[in-house]
Image (tube, rainbow, N blue to C red):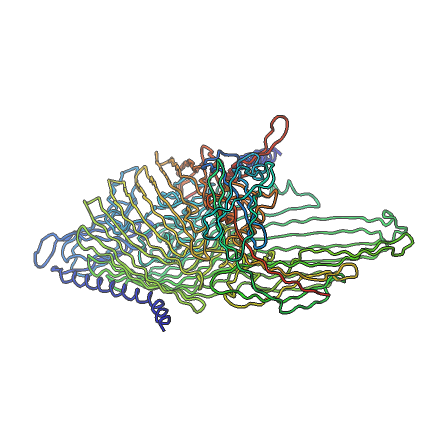
Amino acid sequence: MNLTRKTSYKSRRPMMRTAALAVLFLTITFGSIAYGQQKTSTKKATVSGHIVDAKSGEPLIGAAILSETKASGPGNGRKVSPAGTVTNNFGFYSISISEGKATLRCSYIGYQDMTIDTDIQKDTTINIKLEQSDLFLNEAVVTSSRNETGVRGTQMSAIDVPINQIKNIPAFAGEVDVLKAIQLLPGVQSGTEGSAGLYVRGGGPDENLLMIDGIPLYNVSHMFGFFSVFNADAIKNVTLYKGDFPARFGGHLSSVVDVRMNDGNDQSWHGSASIGLISAKVNVEGPIVKGKTSFNVSARRTYMDLLLQPALWIVNEKDEKYGGGYDFYDINAKVTHKFSDKDRLSLSFYMGDDNAHFKMRTKDDYVYNGYEYGGSVQEDSYQEHSQQNLKGRWRWGNMVTALRWNHVITPKLYLNTTASYTRYRQRLGVGYEEKEERTYITGTVDSNESKMDVDYNSNIGDLSGNVDLEYIPNTRHSVKFGGQYTWHAFNPGVNSMSASDTSEEMNFSYSYGDRKVDAHEAAIYGEDNWTATRWLKINYGLRASLYSIDGKTWLSAEPRLSARALIIDDLSFKASYSEMSQYVHMLSNSSLTLPSDLWVPVTKDIRPMRSRQVAAGFFYTLGAFDFSVEGYWKTMDNIIEYKDGASFLGSTTGWEEKVCMGRGWSYGLEFFVQKKFGKTTGWVGYTLAKAMRRFDKKGNMLNNGLPFPAKYDRRHDLNITVTHAFSKKFDLSATFVFSSGNCGTLAMQKFLGGDMGEDFGAGINYYEHRNNYRMPPYHRLDIGMNFYRFHKRGTGIWNISIYNAYCHMNPFIVYVGDETEYVNGEYTSRPAVKQMSIFPIIPTFSYTYRF
Amino acid sequence: MKIFDCMKHIIKASVTAAAIISLSACEKEIKFTGRQQETSIVMFSLASPGDELSVSIRQSAFILDKEWWETIEKGIPGAKVNAFIGNSTEPLPFTLSGNDRNSALFTSGYQPKPGEKIRIEAEADGFKNVYAETEIPLEPVFGVESIRTEKGETDSEAVVYMKIRIDDPDGKKNFYRLNISQTYRHEGTIWTSDGKISTQEISYGSSPVAFYSNDPLFQDGITDSIFGIEVEKELKNYFTDSRFDGDSYSFEIYFPVYDDDYMKTVSIDIKLEALSKEYYEYIASLDAYYESDDFSLFSEPVQVICNVKNGIGCCGASTPSEISVTLE
């Protein structure tokens, strides 16, 4: 009896918690809105519209608008407190101001401020076009950061990185990379050298929600993690959230990377084409109907496969030929149509694939003479001609497509609906064919053909629908709420095998594989950005998510809370608390990002991951500089690590037996200084952090249940990136990176093992605990130069970049191996700690033409 | 022609540069920056009822020791080893057998009994004192439920199918290991030069037998699979009672035996050992260690589980029970 009551209470607990938090959220929200309405004595009207780039029509995200009004009616001529807001992800703003004469001031980083004097007597639509600043004509007065991530906003643990800054960062192999730029921010660790993985505040690489135009992407890497799938030419804005997650985001524990694509220039045609050492890119944007419909298309392809061909020509011989190569491509496309000021429709598409292939063909001619083996006749003599063909292809990639409708329901209520499909798949195929023909001296001909093909396919696809609403009832509240639904289709792996052999009269084919699994994920959320007083602003929210798979349903409530206290106009203190849940894991090896990394859903034994994070910090603006110092504490539950010796290579068979479930915690202090505009831009970030893991539950034990450092626990991390525009024709950028060494597991002792120490000659490595060794520190300097040549119809840009300018050989892997020495006339071998590095100094150049 | 020559030079220079760059980006020795650990006492002991309690004492070697293979084989002759049986505070002393530098076996003359708790301590100059504890398991209860023989794949062998039942005691987690061996009769024949048999010799021998089973009991553990193709792993002959805790459990095994005129298996010896938890964890982790790579981009190295505090090694226990089945 008691057991039943206990079980039933335990399963109702998440539901009760969710209901209680929802009631609290709704009470506070409606209560404070109603109170705010009562307090207002002057009549209000709503001014709304879009803020766009004057030349291209591109909506500006996070542009600030501030109004100062003199009230009409009671207290006529009295100046009313200024009201302000920022544009949303679609460039839309809505501000509630007192009726009467008003001055609207609009500002955005990199653009000239605009002031509009107007007389507001009713709800009014005002669309604003901002002109870009020419920093060589007039160093624009940079207004203080009024966007939500700045001093005045409640949002903390988030960084906006202007795309222009990302494009100026010296790039590895000349490929501008959004994720590599994010790795230079405080609180973000990169994994191994060259990897695009993100380890944010002690979290793992699968704990990051990476989105393009609001749609999640799986496996965001090309070329084993050395490049990301984001083509900088197609991107407008990048925001990284490391904590204090807005309630509209969920599903991943550690970070949200929100990448927004360009809509396309709706006034005139523009574009760029560039060619570098390993890839070529093209971008074209323009109006289909001027002012109404615009498009933006970007494409990128590497040609490493072509560069390999000359080497293959050298190696190939008449009877032994090799072929192969590797390439990847990306296509981003977006079409946007504005029906009116109130309605916009956009269709966006992304597709990218990596393709590695090889082939080998050998020919053999053989003559057998019957006399040679003691035979007395020549009848057995024959000539044999054989040919073997071996080919393989490994292909992997993403496809994303989304249809979005934005509608201004009322000046205070904005709707965004999205239907999307995202898919990641990988295919591996190996084929072997052998042909033999034997011609006997008697004239008889024997021939045989055998073939074998093995194909492996796996994929994961999501079909999603989102409805997001923004409601601005008055100057003190900005409410966001909505719902999301995703149907996940996991297809972990299907093998097809076929084989035939004419001599043995064999011919068969069959398929087998892991079971396909469908899962349903849904969430509703609400958040309110409440200006409680002039100095106190609070953002509180709740996200309730549900995940259903194989008859089991998980429910979780994720409260979010942050507050900003304005100490003086340009100095604020912020604090936040957020909880996140994650229902999928990525099965991956520990060092490299492989295309065979697979996403798997939670099961009855492997529960959803959960994190709690508290953060607090000071934020200060001084002219064009933004300063912040932020501390955090984060705990993670039900995270998985692989058991000792377990590995994955493209298969989920028995994956639950290979992993252990445990917990992690991390804490740190982040210092950040950023300058986003001017002749000199860049940032300096320093992080002091620690990340630990513990797996001590029965059946889930690692490291004997003792705590151990997380794989990418690094104590110190310093990143400096600076770009200086000397003139319109030349700019120079440099990036310096320094971090403490990564962890690795090295044996420190050897002992005579075997069954109770009786196996003579077998030295067993003894690992005292996991991640017990620190690799040497990592540091490098990258330099980039841009030379501009202005032509009548466009601009040519030569870029020269040097990755790892002073050629410091950074550790990729550290292990104990044998070192051979020549001592006293003989070769001897001794054990030594060895380091493998992969990237020395890499100079690259590229040429871009912009029109 | 000029353009072609120029292209050739460019290609050669690019290829040379690429080769230099790639060759320079490889491996090199670096200075060891970790904390150099002191070497430890390596202590092993397997207590079994009916066998004299003995302990092997050696030393470990630092990973960068140039002659580690000599160091790990060295005994520690001056080591003092004692054991405490049950709640007794009276130490049971051990004496070293042999007197060369590799002598490592210390014997006590004591035969432990099932159910006894044993604590073994060792100390030596220059090393941290070490100790380990174990408990002698009770004798396992099992029986052979059925046995049948079928023709094997070749004329000289047969396959024995054997169903075994284990009665697992309730109350705690138990660990087992199963070994099968065969006793066979060998008829040797000596032929004379004129093709006649001159002598027939009959001798008996025994050898261990590797058995197979489709029972899930022996399928536990990490299976390997590469792109959906399962890689066969060696069947493990040790298991826990997680599938049948406190109950009886039957399972079938099968194995080949000799079956021709010259070599014929006459009896099968089935030995089921109850193992202590420490010993089970040691052999399971040791097997995983042997199957893994010391260095891999794809997995973490395997930690061999030791129960010797301040040192390395395993002091465990096993209690066997044997049944012999005659085939002829």
Residue B285 in sight here: yes
Side of A642 where A128 appears, left or right? left
| Residue drawn at (71%, 46%) of the image | A319
Residue A222 in sight here: no
User: Residue B94 appears in which quarter of the rendering?
Assistant: top right
Tell me: residue A519, above or below residue A126: below
- Locate the N terminus of chain A by quadrant: bottom left
Determine the residue located farthest toward the bottom in the rendered image.
A1
- Image location of residue A699, percent across then percent down: 46, 57
- Image location of residue A627, percent across then percent down: 27, 42
> Foreground: B50 or A15?
B50
Determine the residue located farthest toward the front in the rendered image.
B90
- Locate the C terminus of chain A by quadrant: top left
> Foreground: A210 or A552?
A552
| Residue drawn at (66%, 55%) of the image | A432
Determine the residue located farthest toward the left in the rendered image.
A75
Side of A553 where A578 appears, left or right? left
Tell me: residue A36, above or below residue A806: below
Tell me: residue A554, above or below residue A83: below
- Image location of residue B289, percent across then percent down: 55, 49
Determine the residue located farthest toward the top in the rendered image.
A824
All told, the count of numbered labels is 0
> Foreground: A326 or A679?
A326
- Image location of residue A788, percent across then percent down: 40, 37
